[in-house]
Amino acid sequence: PERVEQEWYALLIAYNAVRKVMAHAAATASVCPRRLSFTAALERLRECAYEMMRLATERLPRRYARGLEMIAPSSGRRALAVQVPETR
């Protein structure tokens, strides 16, 4: 059970890390974070992380900013991540 508990904590940390990046992307694009899809954001983060592993250190901030834009595009840009419709 110790390993199960450790795995559970790892999943909770990963979930919260994805939500934190989604909140940062939403704030940057002035979008409500609840309108972003968790699954789509996770896919974009996986793509971004894979690319960032191969980049030089000085190029990482620019790639991170581009990743945020992919998760929550600014107004006027086509959404790559699925946006959830607003609820009442």
Image (spheres, rainbow, N blue to C red):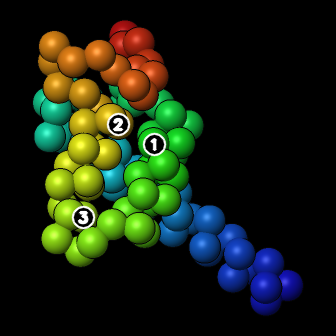
Circle 1 Cα neighbour tier, 10 Å, few/some/many (<14 / 14–19 / ≥20): some
Report the residue at 48% width, 49% height from top: 47
Residue 38 shows in this picture = no
Q: Name which of mark 2 and mark 1 comes first in the sequence.
A: 1
Q: Name which of mark 3 and mark 2 comes first in the sequence.
A: 3
Circle 3/circle 1 CB separation < 8 Å:
no
The residue where tag 1 is placed is 44
The answer to whether 76 appears left or right of 60 in the picture is: left
Q: Name which of mark 3 and mark 1 comes first in the sequence.
A: 1
Q: Position of residue 6 (x, y in %)?
A: 69, 82
Relative vertical location of residue 32 with respect to residue 4 in this rendering, above or below: above
Tell me the amino acid under the disc marked 3.
Leu
Circle 2/circle 1 CB separation < 8 Å:
yes
Report the residue at 51% width, 68% height from top: 13
Quadrant for the C terminus, please.
top left
Gap between marks 3 and 1, in whole Å?
15 Å
Circle 3 Cα neighbour tier, 10 Å, few/some/many (<14 / 14–19 / ≥20): some
Point out the residue furthest to the right here.
1
Q: Position of residue 73 (x, y in %)?
A: 25, 28
For marks 3 and 1, give the one nearer the viewer.
3
Circle 3/circle 2 CB separation < 8 Å:
no
The residue where tag 2 is placed is 71
Q: Secondary structure at mark 3?
A: helix
Q: Position of residue 46 (x, y in %)?
A: 51, 52
Residue 69 shows in this picture = yes
Please name whichever residue, 43 or 7, is drawn nearer the observer in this view of the structure.
43
Relative vertical location of residue 33 with respect to residue 7 in this rendering, above or below: above
Report the residue at 62% width, 65% height from top: 11
Gap between marks 3 and 2, in whole Å?
17 Å
The residue where tag 3 is placed is 60
Please name whichever residue, 5 or 61, is drawn nearer the observer in this view of the structure.
61
Count of marks, rendered view: 3
